[in-house]
Amino acid sequence: MSEFYSALTTSTRLIVNFDPDLTEIVLLSLKVSLTAVALAAAIGLPLGAAVALFRFPGRGLVAALLNAFMGLPPVVVGLALYLALSRSGPLGALGLLFTPAAMIIAQSILITPIIAALTRQTIADLNEEYDEQLQALGARGLRKMCTLLWDGRFSLLTAILAGFGRASAEVGAILIVGGNINHVTRVMTTSIALETSRGNLSLALALGLILIALSISVNAAAMAVRDVAYRYYR
Amino acid sequence: MSHIVTIANQRKDNFADDAIAKARTPSPVLPLVARDVCYRAGDGEPLIRNISLVLQSGPCTVLLGPNGAGKSLLLRLCHGLIKPNQGAIRWGGQSPARAHRWVAMVFQKPVLLRRSAAANIDYALALKGIPRRSRKLRVEEALTRAALAAIANRPARALSGGEQQRVAIARAWATQPQVLLLDEPTANLDPIATYRIETLIQTIREAGTRIIMSTHDLNQARRLGDEVLFLHQGRLLEHTPAEEFFAHPQSAQAAAFIDGKLVY
């Protein structure tokens, strides 16, 4: 149990002292995960909605794959991206390996299927209710898709938060493509892994507590915005 | 420089308005002609059986009949939301899809979008290609005529059932249709909400829009109907002026329905 007490005191000290190393790591974590979420939402929301609404050959297969890819193993994604970005790989010329950009790409790949699959289900359900009405009003194609995405915004926020949860907790992929380089690609989860392997268990646990607190704050902020918006625009 | 651009834009807008005015010149969608229309869902029993009818321009047609008679299905067939398995429906010679611009439909349970009442109407106008500049005025006008001005900016989903139905009717009417299809507009509403909606329907009718509405409420049919289509088990049993229908129903089913007996 003593690890927990010392973790609590360590985390409190780190936060109260505004530890510069910790601040840097926290900010990079947020930057990587939030950018990845934004990218994944920009792809996943229209992708999921399109699969829900438009009929095309292989639609069932795409839907099944999206669902299956929600469970993509991060280390495998990390390894594949590592091979693609390494100097001899197809994207090696970009020089992205061991940069935050590589970490953002890795997390986007991981969470796009999550956002797309949850969006597909949400929009499919919503379409049951809206289909005839939108048809009667004359909304078709992309217009209809945008209307449904906008009217599903409160449910879709949950899909985006699920993506953020996966991104902020993920370590396997960003460790491989980022390399956990101090002051360059070190984030919360990779630091925790590092401190654990060094045997600094209470420091690792302290970082873990801060990460969880961070995650709760982001979710609480999102839900607060949602609640205010819902009051005015439901 | 900027005023030149403005003038150019105005020119463009004027051209756009001309084009819209041209597109808006209504090609008449009446008469509505249905020829031998049958509809069944999947392999099931036919739900609409060999309905043929001609509706000319005139004030208000009421589709009357018990639940399950096929009133909603017939309206949806007329609006092209579902396709008949047999027979055809023509609006002034055009398919329901082509007549869509001039025919509007309001559902028994209308779906309002998650935005304000005014924005719901604006959305419908935007879909009909009406330019943003003219929309604001038309939204205000539609809300005023439906006595909804006071709740224009309230979220549509938070309104009462009766108000939601009125927003839906105002939204359909704002697009200036020649024909308005109303499916059970007052089902599950209390007498005051029903009264307000009937008043709105009268206003629309007096403004010259052809109304075709379904109801299972005899008194409503008496109040609003000029002619009655009586449906029973997917068949069109009567198509007569309202007075004649209520005084001398021709079919046993209609007579029983008017007497308030249960008809199957």
Image (cartoon, coloured by chain):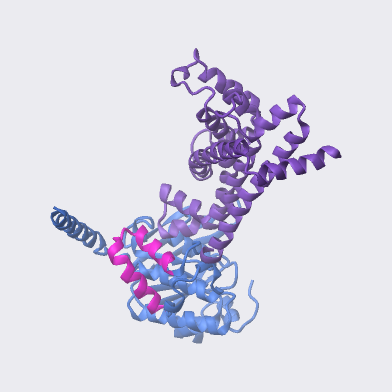
Chain colours: A purple, B blue
Vertical relation: A62 (above or below) B40: above
Looking at the figure, which quarter contains the N terminus of chain A?
top right
Q: Position of residue A202 (x, y in %)?
A: 77, 35
Front-lying residue, B28 or A7:
A7
Vertical relation: B197 (above or below) B91: below
Magenta span: B118-146
Q: Position of residue B216 (x, y in %)?
A: 56, 75
Front-lying residue, A19 or A27:
A19
Residue at far front of view: A17
Q: Residue at x 43, y 75 (%)?
A: B61
State the count of labels: 0
| Left or right of B105 on screen, residue B177 | left
Q: Where, by quadrant of the figure, is residue B32 drawn?
A: bottom left
Vertical relation: A207 (above or below) B167: above
Asked if residue B141 is among those painted magenta in the image, a careful observer would answer: yes
Residue at far top of view: A88
Q: Where, by quadrant of the figure, is residue B55 drawn?
A: bottom left
Asked whether residue A71 appears in the rendered view, the answer is no
Front-lying residue, B202 or A100:
A100
| Left or right of B158 on screen, residue A16 | right
Looking at the figure, which quarter contains the C terminus of chain A?
bottom right
Asked whether residue A178 appears in the rendered view, the answer is yes
Asked if residue B42 is among those painted magenta in the image, a careful observer would answer: no
Magenta stretch: dominant secondary structure = helix
Q: Residue at x 60, y 41 (%)?
A: A163
Q: Position of residue B152 (x, y in %)?
A: 44, 73
Q: Residue at x 33, y 57 (%)?
A: B94
